[in-house]
Amino acid sequence: MQQQNNSPLSLLERKIFTRESVKHTLNYWHFMGKKIVFTNGCFDILHKGHVAYLTEAKALGDVLIMGLNSNSSVKKLKGESRPVNDENARAFVLAGLAGIDAVIIFEEDTPYDLIKFIQPHVLVKGGDYKPEQIAGHDLVEASGGKVVIIPFVQGFSTTAVIRKMK
């Protein structure tokens, strides 16, 4: 029997999944009756606003799954100069946060298919969205779940951090 590497870095890497590799863990969480919270975003340069947002999201359930925009989808959303950090680096940093239980990188323009696959009980987004503007709101609401919008922390954004660095 092969021994599992339990180094601190290995433990973080085990929180980063593909859709295929997360199936077993996801089935277990659903079977155990865990309240699954899903959020998504680019999380290019982590800042106070992100950490506050993710902490509030985690408080809404037992398991927090992060859908992370791939490099190509960040580029489409934010422009040619982004992302600053590649998808693997961003996934690793997010996996290092205690409140995040799983990180899944997605290629599509929206996480709609990923939300359909995960079937979260709570869908969380930051900002000034209306629930009906959030990708996957219909799936979550149809299954009896809820959509929660967490306000931005004023004065913190990745764009502002990049501007300040220049």
Image (cartoon, rainbow, N blue to C red):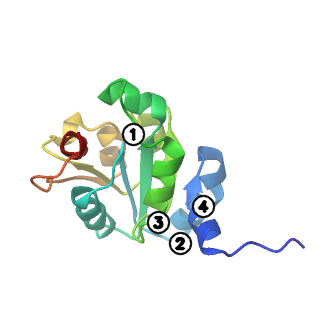
Which label's residue is closer to the chain start, 1 or 3? 1
Marks 2/1: CA distance? 38 Å
Q: Nearer the viewer, mark 2 or mark 1?
A: 1
Residue 67 position in % (x across, y down): 43, 47
Residue 128 position in % (x across, y down): 12, 43
In the displayed image of the protein, which residue is found farthest to the left? 154
Image point (51%, 56%), residue name: 92
Left or right of 118, for residue 4: right
The residue that mark 2 highlights is: 32
Q: Residues within 10 Å of mark 2 (few under 14, many from 20)?
A: few
Which label's residue is closer to the chain start, 1 or 4? 4
Q: Amino acid at mark 1?
A: Val
Contact, mark 1 vs mark 3 (Cβ under 8 Å): no
Q: Is residue 19 above or below residue 9?
A: above
Q: Nearer the viewer, mark 4 or mark 2?
A: 4
Q: Amino acid at mark 2?
A: Met
Q: Which mark is residue 84?
A: 1
Marks 1/3: CA distance? 18 Å
Residue 90 position in % (x across, y down): 45, 50
Contact, mark 3 vs mark 4 (Cβ under 8 Å): no
Image point (43%, 43%), residue name: 85
Q: Amino acid at mark 4?
A: Glu
In the displayed image of the protein, which residue is found farthest to the right? 1
Left or right of 95, for residue 128: left
Question: In this view of the protein, which residue sits in the foreground, 65 or 105?
Answer: 105
The residue that mark 4 highlights is: 13
The residue that mark 3 highlights is: 96
Contact, mark 2 vs mark 3 (Cβ under 8 Å): no
Q: Quadrant of the N terminus?
A: bottom right
Q: Residues within 10 Å of mark 3 (few under 14, many from 20)?
A: some
Q: Is residue 109 above or below residue 54?
A: above
